[in-house]
């Protein structure tokens, strides 16, 4: 009797273990959930947009899409930006990537190399889609892999009170005006600095958001036309020399090497930084955290004597279709919906960005007047970000930032720093 | 009593003329017991295989390919990745930083933990004050690493509280960027790690101190030992097994510390705080070199394994 009890208990324990193991294995069975059920196709849409938009708004947009496209349902898979990237890469490797994915330009090369993203050019052609209405299409190795649905410009934010205190009446439009203003603010005797340059290596996005805008504003580039690193060209050297000039003049906020983007915005909000490049998305946050802050947004200052178009650092909420998706036709319909003038405008209004459709325009009624001002600046210039479609974009920025740190810390020549960065980048391309 | 219990067993014993019956009843229960034991253990065994053995085996497997996950057709390259990692200067710099960070952290954890544990164990202060100290001293342990990182980033900001206090008391540090200076950053993150980790030592050693019989101290006192002699000849020998175990565990944990470094310095400036965990993370999620990251992880695993063996042996000796 005792022995029989033990046997039964052992069998029960083994059974529980089996159930646990089967439960683990059956997770893959969920991949079948998107199969047509009664003629309905469920599209998975992985993105980081939903948490950043007003609560419920993105789901409402998807409900509208579903009502306009009977037979298609959209399941939103939402998470933070960095988590979305890792999940897309892991999903592409395991074959569980969502049908439609939100994309950042800096991920494209690696996802494209992985074969994770479908060539949208072919899909657009199959569906006779008019691409002339798109603000931008991003290609990697000749294949269109992403279309921006919303663009975010990074103009120069200027604290007008700090400028006025040092006798400057107008925001700077050239580098020399900027240097004079930034230096004056830092030397005014208070705890404010002229400019903030976050160089922390955790994300190292200070390179694209704070250093390279000096190069891009004057029409310069850091890549050749065929996408190879070209850091030692005249415009690139001139841009970084200007940064060093600001550093040597004491115009840069202290703590640059450990400063992250959010620190920069907080310093500006607290009135301790006179000028910064930043996303328009921060306007509302600045108004909320310091209602008395008197600031404006202007185009990035250009090299003295430059009269060409101004390149404005732009990041995007891009969208693409997974190469492994079995519902590309339905996924295209969702893209078409998101990129339409009406939806793109609506989305950009909520996100404080600019639409991905040339016929679209954000609804500025009831919004901060600075958004309209920034939209005009954006339309007068051209969107620029050379990390879009570049390989290991985050690592490239980290390598560049490390060389800039080394240069500023050891007072080394700009050309040495750019030469070292060029060598490091060449290895990655 | 004896005859009553023996009689039925003898009667049930099979006769020698029936060998099959003899084998059957003897083997059956033993086998069943053995299977039953495996049945009981099987949930744990399955979990260990699924959650530990399989990922470890996969990472070891990845380390011999040219690249994986982002590469649809990985090729076996043997030990080439190991050669690349071991000849990478950045890996050795990360290794040196890890060593300094770990050894200093563990040593100070031990000293601070023991000091505060003795403070909380003494009769020289009243019970209320001791309770208050206990709450205050254990506070750092209650914060998650994310909170610790944000807190210390603000404290060590050039315009933060630390610089303000030092400048106020006459130590002229100006606007020192503790986490942004190549000369100071490793020291700064080590201090943060010490602050975040000493309460574990304090609590564990306090329990150890309270387990030392008072008679031992009294006997030493009767023999004429002063407090310092009692500390070295009674307290430390009694705590030695605990100190060794805690020390080894802390070495293993600190070697693997990732979030604190990542959220305070990201391994910068200029690699000054790059440790093996951040080095490996960057290989995987910044450069997408998952095979190289796996190789680095295997090397770290081997080093940790040595420490784990020491820990297991110390535990065995204690038993």
Image (cartoon, rainbow, N blue to C red):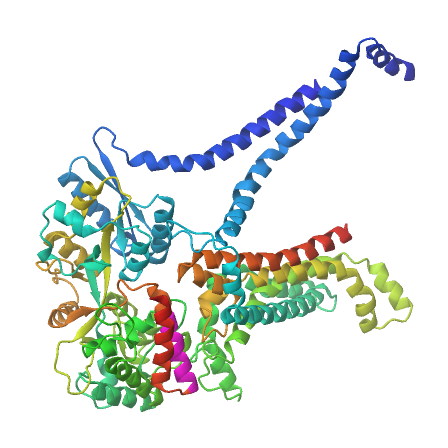
User: Which corner quadrant holds the N terminus of chain B?
Assistant: top right
Expressed as whole percent of the image width and height from the top left, the position of residue A345 reads 13, 57
Q: Nearer the viewer, residue A124 or A97?
A: A124
- Is A407 magenta? The answer is yes
Expressed as whole percent of the image width and height from the top left, the position of residue B153 reads 45, 71
Q: Nearer the viewer, residue A135 or A229?
A: A229
Q: Nearer the viewer, residue B227 or A83?
A: A83
Q: Which quarter of the picture shows residue B175?
A: bottom left
Left or right: residue A346 versus residue B115 is left
Left or right: residue B27 versus residue A23 is right
Q: Classify B143 as above or below B76.
A: below
Expressed as whole percent of the image width and height from the top left, the position of residue A168 reads 20, 88
The residue lying at 53 percent from left, 47 percent from top is B57
Q: Classify B165 as above or below B248.
A: below
Left or right: residue A424 versus residue B235 is left
Q: Which quarter of the picture shows residue A156?
A: bottom left
What main secondary structure does the magenta stretch of the protein show? helix
Expressed as whole percent of the image width and height from the top left, the position of residue A43 reads 25, 41
- Is B304 magenta? The answer is no
- Residue range of the region highlighted in magenta in the rendering: A397-410
Q: Which quarter of the picture shows residue A258?
A: bottom left
**Is residue B144 among what the camera can see?**
no
**Is residue A395 among what the camera can see?**
yes
The residue lying at 51 percent from left, 71 percent from top is B89
Q: Classify B193 as above or below B6.
A: below
């Amino acid at each position: 009797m005792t022995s029989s009890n033990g046997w039964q208990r052992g069998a029960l324990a083994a059974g529980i273990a089996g159930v646990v193991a089967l439960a683990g294995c059956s997770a893959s069975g969920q991949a079948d959930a998107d199969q047509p059920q009664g003629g309905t196709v469920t599209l998975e849409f992985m993105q980081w947009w939903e948490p950043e938009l007003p609560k419920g708004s993105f789901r409402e947009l998807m409900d509208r899409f579903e009502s306009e496209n009977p037979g298609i349902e959209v399941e939103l898979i939402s998470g933070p930006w960095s988590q979305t990237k890792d999940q897309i890469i892991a999903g592409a490797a395991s074959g569980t990537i969502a049908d439609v994915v939100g994309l950042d330009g800096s991920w494209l090369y690696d996802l494209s190399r992985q074969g994770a993203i479908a060539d949208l050019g072919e899909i657009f052609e199959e569906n006779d889609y008019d691409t002339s209405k798109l603000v931008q299409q991003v290609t990697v190795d000749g294949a269109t892999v992403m279309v921006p649905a919303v663009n975010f410009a990074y103009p120069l934010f200027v604290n007008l009170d700090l400028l006025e205190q040092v006798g400057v009446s107008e925001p700077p439009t050239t580098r020399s005006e900027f240097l004079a203003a930034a230096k004056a603010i830092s030397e005014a005797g208070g705890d404010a600095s002229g400019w903030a340059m976050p160089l922390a290596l955790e994300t190292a996005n200070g390179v694209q958001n704070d250093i390279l805008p000096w190069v891009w504003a004057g029409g310069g580039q850091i890549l050749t036309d065929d996408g190879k690193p070209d850091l030692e060209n005249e415009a690139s050297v001139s841009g970084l020399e200007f940064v060093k000039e600001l550093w040597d003049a004491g115009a840069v906020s202290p703590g640059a090497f450990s400063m992250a983007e959010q620190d920069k915005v907080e310093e500006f909000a607290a009135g301790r930084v006179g000028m910064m490049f930043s996303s328009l998305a921060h306007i509302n946050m600045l108004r909320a955290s310091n209602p008395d802050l008197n600031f404006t947004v202007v185009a990035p200052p250009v090299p003295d004597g430059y009269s060409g178009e101004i390149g404005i650092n732009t990041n995007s909420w891009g969208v693409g279709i997974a190469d492994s998706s079995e519902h590309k036709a339905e996924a295209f319909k969702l893209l078409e919906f998101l990129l339409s003038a009406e939806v793109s405008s609506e989305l950009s209004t909520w996100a404080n960005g600019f639409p991905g459709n040339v016929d679209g325009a954000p609804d500025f009624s009831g919004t901060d007047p600075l958004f309209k001002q920034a939209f005009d600046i954006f339309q007068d210039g051209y969107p620029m970000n050379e990390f879009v479609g570049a390989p290991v974009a985050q690592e490239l920025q980290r390598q560049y930032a490390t060389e800039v740190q080394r240069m500023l810390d050891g007072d080394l020549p700009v050309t040495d720093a750019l030469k070292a960065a060029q060598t490091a980048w060449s290895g990655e391309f | 009593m004896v005859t009553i219990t023996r009689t039925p067993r003898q009667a049930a014993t099979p006769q020698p003329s029936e060998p099959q019956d003899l084998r059957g009843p003897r083997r059956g229960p033993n086998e069943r017991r053995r299977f039953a034991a495996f049945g009981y253990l099987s949930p744990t065994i399955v979990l260990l295989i699924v959650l530990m053995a399989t990922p470890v085996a996969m990472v070891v497997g990845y380390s011999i390919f040219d690249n994986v996950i982002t590469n649809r057709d990985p090729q076996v390259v043997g030990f080439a990745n190991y050669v690349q990692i071991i000849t990478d200067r950045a890996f050795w710099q990360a290794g040196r930083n890890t060593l300094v960070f770990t050894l200093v952290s563990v040593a100070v954890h031990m000293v601070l933990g023991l000091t505060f544990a003795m403070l909380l164990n003494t009769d020289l202060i009243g019970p209320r004050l001791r309770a208050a100290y206990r709450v205050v001293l254990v506070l750092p342990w209650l914060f998650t690493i994310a909170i610790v990182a944000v807190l210390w980033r603000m404290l060590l900001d050039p315009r933060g509280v630390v610089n303000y206090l030092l400048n106020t008391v006459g130590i002229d540090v100006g606007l020192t960027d503790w986490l942004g200076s190549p000369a100071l950053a490793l020291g700064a993150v080590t201090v943060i790690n010490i602050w975040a980790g000493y309460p574990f030592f304090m609590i564990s050693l306090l329990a150890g101190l309270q387990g030392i019989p008072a008679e031992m101290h009294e006997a030493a006192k009767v023999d004429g030992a002063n407090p310092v002699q009692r500390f070295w000849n009674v307290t430390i020998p009694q705590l030695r097994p605990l100190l060794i175990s805690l020390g080894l565990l802390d070495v293993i944990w600190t070697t693997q510390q990732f979030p604190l470094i990542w959220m305070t310095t990201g391994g910068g400036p200029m690699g000054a705080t790059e440790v093996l965990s951040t080095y490996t993370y960057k290989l995987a999620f910044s450069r997408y070199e998952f095979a190289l990251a796996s190789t680095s992880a295997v090397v770290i695993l081997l080093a940790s394994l040595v420490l784990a063996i020491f820990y297991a042996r110390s535990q065995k000796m204690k038993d």
